[in-house]
Image (cartoon, rainbow, N blue to C red):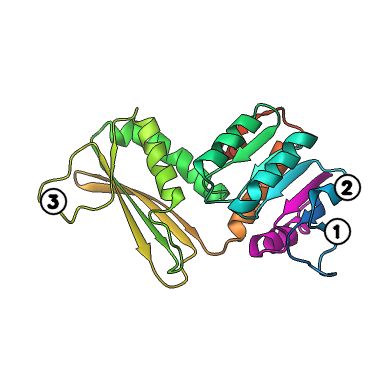
Amino acid sequence: MTKVLLVGCNGYMGRVVSGLVSETDRIVVAAGVDVADSGDQTPYPVYTSYDEIKEDIDVIIDFSSAAAVDAVLDYAVQNKIPLVECTTGLSDAQIARLEEASGQVAVLRSANMSLGINILIKLVKEAVKTLGQAGFDIDIVEKHHRRKVDAPSGTAIALADAVNEAGEGRYTYTYDRSQRRMPRPSDEIGISAVRGGTIVGEHEVIFAGTDEVVSFKHNAFSRAVFGKGAIQAALFLAGKPAGLYDMSDVIG
């Protein structure tokens, strides 16, 4: 049985992960960490300080906040516990710390924890090898709820980076075509963002060629997809040697 320390357990995603773990074999939440008191609402102990943790832990899942990541990382490194880092909005310095820590402990971080999105990234890389070489134009359209403050999404950039990696770095990214009057260059990826309503997340990669269009699309209907991916990542990472991993390692 894989024993998890769930950081941010009383937040929205923490509660989602707790519920999903209770329905999943081979894994259990042994303890949680959160600044908020959960009372008796969780079936496992919840601590406000890492010094209080008594349970044996196989892997950490962190769905807290960027401000809390440094303390999570310190605990993971000091105790040599693999870390699945799901928190977004990290600074460049924090990302550098994660990379440095991966020399001492297994660390998994991904722009998007969804299994479906990571399969999409894998498929897009394969498509570029054929369609990109054939001169297909490539655009990415992403849609999210009206409260999302960043645009484009980190996942849209990850998809563009996947295209560029498979295309051997020949593409540039374009976010706004409103100020130019010219045909699109063949080496650009257009990235567009829609914000509205309660859209959880939609990403589409469009390959437009002469007289045919191929589209790859992923829809997230709830944030539970990120929790499911984090659980699969935790099952994968437990017991792994030090190193920097991502969801492509999980899906194979």
Q: Is residue 21 magenta?
A: yes
Q: Is residue 252 magenta?
A: no
- Indicate whether 80 appears above or below 10: above
- Indicate whether 57 appears above or below 9: above
Nearer the N terminus, badge 2 or badge 3? 2
> Alpha-carbon distance for marks 2 and 3?
60 Å
Residue holding disc 1: 45
Front one among 137 and 66: 66
Q: Verify CB contact (< 8 Å) between mark 2 and mark 3.
A: no
Q: Position of residue 226 (x, y in %)?
A: 59, 54
Q: 56 left or right of 178?
A: right
Residue holding disc 2: 55
Location of residue 129 by image quarter? top left
Q: Position of residue 59 (x, y in %)?
A: 76, 42
Q: Position of residue 26 (x, y in %)?
A: 80, 47
Start-end of magenta stretch: 1-25
Marker disc for residue 180: 3
Front one among 114 and 178: 178
